[in-house]
Image (cartoon, coloured by chain):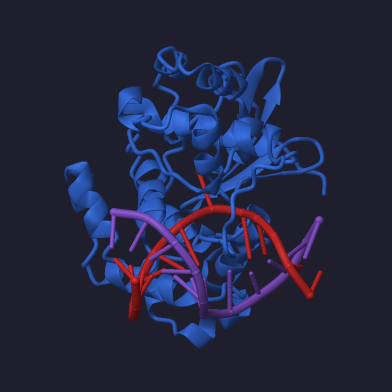
Chain colours: A blue, B red, C purple
Amino acid sequence: MPTAVKTELSIAKAAEFDIKKTFECGQCFRWNADEDGIYTGIVGNKVLKIRELGGSVVCDCEEDELPFWRDYFDLDVDYAEAASRFTQPEYLRLCADYGAGIRILRQESWEALCSFIISQCNNIPRIKKIIEALCVSFGEELSVDTYSFPSAERLASLSESDLAPLRSGYRASYILDAARAVSEGRLSFDELRDMPAEEALAKVKEINGVGDKVANCFMLYGLHRMDRFPIDVWMKRALKAHFPDDFDPEVLGEFSGLAQQYIFYYARTEEGGRRSNVSQKRKNC
DNA sequence: TTCCAGGACCGGG
DNA sequence: CCCGGTCATGGA
């Protein structure tokens, strides 16, 4: 499918914003590339095509939209500076170098919460498939074959049988519980932003189907709390293999979530294929 | 057929 | 507090 690009406004240097790593490091599920490496993403009711061109990252958008996208891509923060403290253990340094150019996106809160509820005990291709089906079924059609992420209010009006075609399994009831909590005001993103971390974490975990890992992912990616450090199966493996037994992510400081992203991305892309003999026993997730 | 995927929850020891 | 079983689905 040829992608028609109208404008090419530079938004950043490729060195500080690697779009492939950023979109494929596991933090988001709705940015997809065509065969030419042009990524298309949908944020709210905005659609953007973006690609790398001659050492720069260029956007197909109007100039007055650039501030929105600069904020979304978090381009006013110096990630190289933030990563400069990730020096030990040596494995972390390796991961940080490998992931250089990754940006932590300022995703929409509801979309992030709902997406990471779907992510549990699931693989990324199927997560993306379920989310896309959710958008096609219940989002708004912004243009041809382009759908917004459905609002919490919209999903709260549905039943489990409405969600059955998504094949999301036992996560369907979790999605509905979260949608209802948000639409009824029991869970306020504005309030969560101003809460101490532990208090916000406990509040989010009141939703059925949201445990420690999903709550931390939501706080990192949906509230941009950069000090959250979600631990999934990949992180557990990496921590066990390459970090001291008593390692505490707190020592990584206010950007520990970025360190987590570097580790996850490296472990999944470099070590994923050859997960040698040390596969710990785990009964079906 | 069995294992695994960015888990959560519940009951029992 | 930690353990094992269970939940639903599809790809390898």
Q: Residue at (57%, 58%) from the top-left corner?
A: A282
Image position of A240 (left or right of A177): right
Q: Would residue A64 be visible to someone looking at this image?
A: no
- Would you place residue A210 above or below residue A55 in this image? below
Q: Position of residue B10 (x, y in %)?
A: 34, 77
- Which quadrant holds the C terminus of chain A? bottom right
Quarter residue A182 falls in? bottom left
Q: Position of residue A175 (x, y in %)?
A: 43, 70
Image position of A3 (left or right of A172): right
Q: How many marks?
A: 0
- Would you place residue C10 above or below residue A280 in this image? below
- Would you place residue A187 above or below residue A224 in this image? below
Q: Residue at (30%, 29%) from the top-left corner?
A: A250
Q: Residue at (41%, 52%) from the top-left corner?
A: A213
Q: Position of residue A216 (x, y in %)?
A: 36, 47
Q: Residue at (43%, 77%) from the top-left corner?
A: A173
Q: Would residue A135 be visible to someone looking at this image?
A: yes
Image position of A111 (left or right of A12): left
Quarter residue A88 falls in? top left
Q: Position of residue B5 (x, y in %)?
A: 61, 54
Q: Nearer the viewer, residue A137 or A238?
A: A238
Q: Nearer the viewer, residue A264 or A117?
A: A264
